[in-house]
């Protein structure tokens, strides 16, 4: 069903003219793009349906004496697939047409919704059956979410991505505030089965909007990555991507403390002297109003203080709001505090999301967003459990104040950590021409590839060369190399060799496709220090394991050199038991038979 999507399809700009800088565009500018506007409106109704359905689901469980644990299991069933499956579905979204991935996931959600609706109208809906059904629906959501997040830059030009992410966050948080109120009204008027049916219709509208969204998709020249291969590539990227690691760490810490606001707010409303369901609705409304109002100020605040400081200031202010909520009972103070809290929440979460959307290259964007979402929701889940337990022992208001204090302290500690400013101009893809295929028969998906780049560096440029190769090492490892080393010749001291290993020939070609303008700049800085009469000499060596033909047999005194011992099934110095082939006696000369020189 899924067809590979080309790397160019992630860069669908309608005009070749230089667009305005992201800082100079309006927050609502993406709504001027017809495709984004259509999908955004449909998604708003879908989000309203989801939150209205959450009220109906909780009512079904409580009315059947499900208990507090069963109510909590609804949230677990809704979040668990996203946490467990997001990296796998991120690999799919990075390798296939994201629009088709979203349609497939939404189709599963609609089928699950139809099943819930049908058994609800037949009066067969039990708490256990409802939780299992929600779990199945959430599997469809886990398939859809990474592709949905990464497809934003396919719907709008690059300079509007930050504003589009912000509008999507407003969409979600506004629905989170309004949807439960709609669900409560419909629950009293028509019953839960009709709310489930309404949610199905809302999702059908979203599917129709995505179906109408058309854009050119060119075929890829390389086959898509396998699931495990894509997962390893994503983890390898995160290991050497400081931006992604920093966003994941900060969002996880933020989620642990900020989760108390959402976890304890219903209890706070219930324990208030004038507490009622209406008061809880007003509190959610205050957060929603704050999210909408704050969205108009996020871009301006980001211009003034930068993304990192905006996140820290928003977290500290949200901590103060939580201290106020825990220490005060006056309604005329609580409602404005919630409005401010909603603004701070949208500022922090939208900035995290925008950082990954804009500062991560397209080839791994869905996977990076999936890992960020896992970190954020992991923090929210752990925090909810933590503050729920503390609320039982210390009281709701005390737990809320402790969470607010922890949020302020963590924001102060993380204040020195800096995220780069949101500028995607350097991440435009600049792929290099593919290396010509070796002229012998081999399996491009097997074995490893050794790439050697020879530089001639004058002694007066050694310090500058040492500084320039540090980001080059991260670049190679981030884009797919599994090992990287730099060697200096023992005789010709001006000769340096950069050597890195790539898992296979296909991965080597993918590394060439993954280069961006920023990567090219790093390579150019190193190349500019080369003083030889010609360009740096490149040599490609292909592992004997990729050869489709047997190699000459071993002599009694020979051992067979292997590739990386950590990845081979046999130990160094022995030959695989299923073959009798080996390298010839002069390993240097025999290596020439399977290497390819390029200048």
Image (spheres, grey):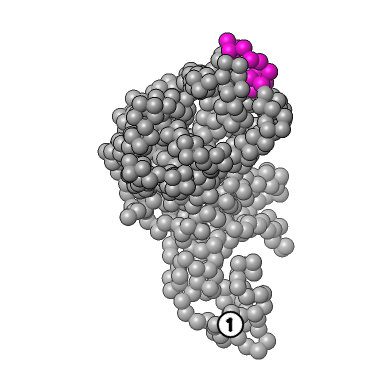
- The main secondary structure of the magenta stretch is helix
**Which is nearer the eye, 489 or 251?**
251
Q: Which residues are magenta?
A: 321-334
**Which is nearer the eye, 353 or 378?**
378
**Which is nearer the eye, 175 or 391?**
391
In the rendered view, tell whether residue 594 sits above or below residue 221.
Answer: below
Rendering coords of residue 135 (x, y %): 46, 47
The magenta stretch spans residue 322: yes
Rendering coords of residue 162 (x, y %): 47, 29
Q: In this view, which residue lies farthest toward the top?
A: 332
Rendering coords of residue 231 (x, y %): 52, 54
Q: Is residue 419 left or right of residue 427?
A: right
In the rendered view, tell whether residue 346 sits above or below residue 579.
Answer: above
Q: Pointer 1: residues within 10 angstroms few (<14), some, or many (20+)?
A: few
x 47%, y 25%: residue: 177
- In this view of the protein, can residue 171 be seen by the observer? no
x 45%, y 70%: residue: 443
Residue 12's image quarter?
top left
Q: Is residue 54 left or right of residue 211?
A: right
**Which is nearer the eye, 108 or 586?**
108
x 50%, y 47%: residue: 81
In the rendered view, tell whether residue 263 sits above or below residue 282.
Answer: below
The magenta stretch spans residue 76: no
Residue 51's image quarter?
top left
Q: Which residue is mark 1?
A: 577
Quadrant, the N terminus: bottom left
- In this view of the protein, can residue 563 be seen by the observer? yes
Secondary structure at badge 1 equals: loop
Rendering coords of residue 281 (x, y %): 49, 22
């Amino acid at each position: 069903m899924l067809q590979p999507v080309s790397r160019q399809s992630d860069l669908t700009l309608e005009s070749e003219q230089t667009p305005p800088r992201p800082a100079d565009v309006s927050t609502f500018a993406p709504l001027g793009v017809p495709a984004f506007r259509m999908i955004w409106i449909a998604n708003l109704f879908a989000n309203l349906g989801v939150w209205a359905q959450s009220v109906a689901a909780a009512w079904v469980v409580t009315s059947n004496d499900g208990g507090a644990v069963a109510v909590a299991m609804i949230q677990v069933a809704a979040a668990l697939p996203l946490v467990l499956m997001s990296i796998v579905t991120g690999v799919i979204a990075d390798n296939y047409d994201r629009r088709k991935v979203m349609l497939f996931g939404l189709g599963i959600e609609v089928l699950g919704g139809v099943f819930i609706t049908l058994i609800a109208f037949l009066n067969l809906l039990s708490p256990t059956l409802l939780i299992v059904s929600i779990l199945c629906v959430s599997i469809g959501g886990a398939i859809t979410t990474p592709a949905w997040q990464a497809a934003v830059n396919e719907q709008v030009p690059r300079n509007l991505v930050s504003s589009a992410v912000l509008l999507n966050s407003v969409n979600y948080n506004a629905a989170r505030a309004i949807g439960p109120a709609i669900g409560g009204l419909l629950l009293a008027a028509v019953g839960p089965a009709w709310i489930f049916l309404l949610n199905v219709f809302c999702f059908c509208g979203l599917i129709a909007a995505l179906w109408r969204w058309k854009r050119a998709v060119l075929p890829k020249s390389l086959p898509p990555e396998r699931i495990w291969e894509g997962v390893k590539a994503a983890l390898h990227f995160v290991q050497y991507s400081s931006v992604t690691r920093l966003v994941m760490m900060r969002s996880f810490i933020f989620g642990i403390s900020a989760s108390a606001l959402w976890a304890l707010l219903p209890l706070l409303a219930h324990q208030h002297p004038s507490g009622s369901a209406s008061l809880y609705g007003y509190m959610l409304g205050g957060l929603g109003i704050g999210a909408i109002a704050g969205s108009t100020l996020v871009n301006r605040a980001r211009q003034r203080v930068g993304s990192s400081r905006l996140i820290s200031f928003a977290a500290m202010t949200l901590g103060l709001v939580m201290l106020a909520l825990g220490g005060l009972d006056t309604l005329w103070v609580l409602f404005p505090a919630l409005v401010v809290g909603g603004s701070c929440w949208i500022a922090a979460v939208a900035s995290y999301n925008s950082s990954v959307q804009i500062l991560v290259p397209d080839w791994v964007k869905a996977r990076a967003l999936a890992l960020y979402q896992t970190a954020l929701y992991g923090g929210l889940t752990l925090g909810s459990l933590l503050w729920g337990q503390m609320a039982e022992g210390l009281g709701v208001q005390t737990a809320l104040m402790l969470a607010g204090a922890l949020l302020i302290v963590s924001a102060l500690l993380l204040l020195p950590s800096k995220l780069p400013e949101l500028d995607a101009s350097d991440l435009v893809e600049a792929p290099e021409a593919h290396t010509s295929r070796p002229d012998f028969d081999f399996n491009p998906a097997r074995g490893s590839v050794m790439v050697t780049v020879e530089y001639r560096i004058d002694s007066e440029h050694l310090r500058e060369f040492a500084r320039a190769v540090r980001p080059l090492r991260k670049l190679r490892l981030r884009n797919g190399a599994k090992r990287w080393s730099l060697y200096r010749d023992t005789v010709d001291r001006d000769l340096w060799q950069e050597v890195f290993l790539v898992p296979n020939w296909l991965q080597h070609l993918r590394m060439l496709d993954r280069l961006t303008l920023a990567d090219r700049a790093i390579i150019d800085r190193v190349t500019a220090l080369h003083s030889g009469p010609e360009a740096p000499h490149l040599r490609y060596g292909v592992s004997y394991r990729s050869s489709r033909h047997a190699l000459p047999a071993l002599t009694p005194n020979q051992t067979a050199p292997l590739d990386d011992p950590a990845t081979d099934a046999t130990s160094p110095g022995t030959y695989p038991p299923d073959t009798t082939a080996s390298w010839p006696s002069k390993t240097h000369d025999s290596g020439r038979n399977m290497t390819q020189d390029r200048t």
